[in-house]
């Protein structure tokens, strides 16, 4: 065997391959959204929406794992690879239905939800780029390789998480619910990227494995399909490159701003207490304020000229020195934080009040009982809530002790003594030793 044949055999995907009829049946069954798949889809939509709403990564991952959206996407790629146009129509129809249902249910959830804040998990899915294309494509390759194996192994859950379909779809629903079409378009574009490149990855692997075509196409029609696929790939990739470039520019801008502030302000002993940047304005803006230093107009002009040295062209530096405006912003921020702290203090105080009802702090009373009633051993005292048959409840003080002697008379005395000494009602004395 030649070295080339050894390499080809080493990287071959034919070893461990599942029976092709069984693969086809599995793909076809995963396309349908009837019965259990429909219920699973509905639950996954709600779970993903809740996870995005409360910013819970664990819940979102759970929704990714149970979502059956991969079924019709893989089915579409499989159908393209085998020229099975009936299967392709069915896959596209089910994908369209599941997409509309996902958008509708998530939009309704976010519309009625009292929490409308845009959490970080939502924001993360509104600006896709070329890296999302790569994740979808290579995740799709892993996914289709896994479904064509006899031993499915661990890749399927990983693919479901990596090629996240449900979160961007629900984020698009969130954009509809709050009327923010920037969020809607960004999230739906990410969802479309994931769907399309998983489909293309499936198509390429099915072609590589040389699955038998259902229809024999003439070269002209086959070329037309390939041209359409290439055209859609270009349409999908070009905006993602632009968004990736824009993300790179924004991060570079932030890094340069931090370097500028560190070297021109912090290193010169000017403590920066306020910083705000705006990358999308024209020109870009940097707003800062210092603790004590006041700059004259010549110094501000000089600092603006220095921006060029830090790669911050077309950027304007604004130094906030209007004490009234600046103090109002700082006080507003402090008041917000103080309100949060005050709410927490209120909750703690209420909890302490609730606990104090049941807490018995007068420990010295136990020593006095031991002196007055030496036959009572292993004393304990506390408060508890007791319900009555009339659906009412009251709090009573309970004294528990051990004694093998007859203590009924002393129990009565102890009860009266405690009620008098501590101004209590409903004292119960219990002897566990009898």
Image (cartoon, rainbow, N blue to C red):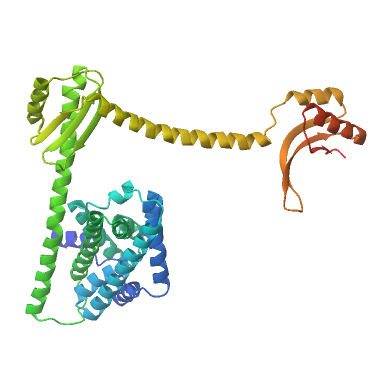
In this view, the residue in front, 75 or 231, is 231
> Left of 161 or right of it: where is 256?
left
Q: Quadrant of residue 247?
A: top left
In this view, the residue in front, 235 or 137, is 235
In this view, the residue in front, 60 or 206, is 60
Q: Is residue 356 above or below residue 224?
A: above
> Left of 289 or right of it: where is 282?
left
Identified at 24% across, 72% down, the residue is 76
Residue 207 place in picture, x, y as percent? 18, 70
Identified at 47% across, 36% down, the residue is 343
**Residue 358 visible in the displayed image:** yes
Q: Quadrant of residue 430?
A: top right
Q: How many marks?
A: 0
Identified at 39% across, 71% down, the residue is 38
**Residue 2 visible in the displayed image:** no
> Left of 165 or right of it: where is 82?
left
Q: Is residue 198 above or below residue 400?
A: below
Residue 179 place in picture, x, y as percent? 28, 57
């Amino acid at each position: 065997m030649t070295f080339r044949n050894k390499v080809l055999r080493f990287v071959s995907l034919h070893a461990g391959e599942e029976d092709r009829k069984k693969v086809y049946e599995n793909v076809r069954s995963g396309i349908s959204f009837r019965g259990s798949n429909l219920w699973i889809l509905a639950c996954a939509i709600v779970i993903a929406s809740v996870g995005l709403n409360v910013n819970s990564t664990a819940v979102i991952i759970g929704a990714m794992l149970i979502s059956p959206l991969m079924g019709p996407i893989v089915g579409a790629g499989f159908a393209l690879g085998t020229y099975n146009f009936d299967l392709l129509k069915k896959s596209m129809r089910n994908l369209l239905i599941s997409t509309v249902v996902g958008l509708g249910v998530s939009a309704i959830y976010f519309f009625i939800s009292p929490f409308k804040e845009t959490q970080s998990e939502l924001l993360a899915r509104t600006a896709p780029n070329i890296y999302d294309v790569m994740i979808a494509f290579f995740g799709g390759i892993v996914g289709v390789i896994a479904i064509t194996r006899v031993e499915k192994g661990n890749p399927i859950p990983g693919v479901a998480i990596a090629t996240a379909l449900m979160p961007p779809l629900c984020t698009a629903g969130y954009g509809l619910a709050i009327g923010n079409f920037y969020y809607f378009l960004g999230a739906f574009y990410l969802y479309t990227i994931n769907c399309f490149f998983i489909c293309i990855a499936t198509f390429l692997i099915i072609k590589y494995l040389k699955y038998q075509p259902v229809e024999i196409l003439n070269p002209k029609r086959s070329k037309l399909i390939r041209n359409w696929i290439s055209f859609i790939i270009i349409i999908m990739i070009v905006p993602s490159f632009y968004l990736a470039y824009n993300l790179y520019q924004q991060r570079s801008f932030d890094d340069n701003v931090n370097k500028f502030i560190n070297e021109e302000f912090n290193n010169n002993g000017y403590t920066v207490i306020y910083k705000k940047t705006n990358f999308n304005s024209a020109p870009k803006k940097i707003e800062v304020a210092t603790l004590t230093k006041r700059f004259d107009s010549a110094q501000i002009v000089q600092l603006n000229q220095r921006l060029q040295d830090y790669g911050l062209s077309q950027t304007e530096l604004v130094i906030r020195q209007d004490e009234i405006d600046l103090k109002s912003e700082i006080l507003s921020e402090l008041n917000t934080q103080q309100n949060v702290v005050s709410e927490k203090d209120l909750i703690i105080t209420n909890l302490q009040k609730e606990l104090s009802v049941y807490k018995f702090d007068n420990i010295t009373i136990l020593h006095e009982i031991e002196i007055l009633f030496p036959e009572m051993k292993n004393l304990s005292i506390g408060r508890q809530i007791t319900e009555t048959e009339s659906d009412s409840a009251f709090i009573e003080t309970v004294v528990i002790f051990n004694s093998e002697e007859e203590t009924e008379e002393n129990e009565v005395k102890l009860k009266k003594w405690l009620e008098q000494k501590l101004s209590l009602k409903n004292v119960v004395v219990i002897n566990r030793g009898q």
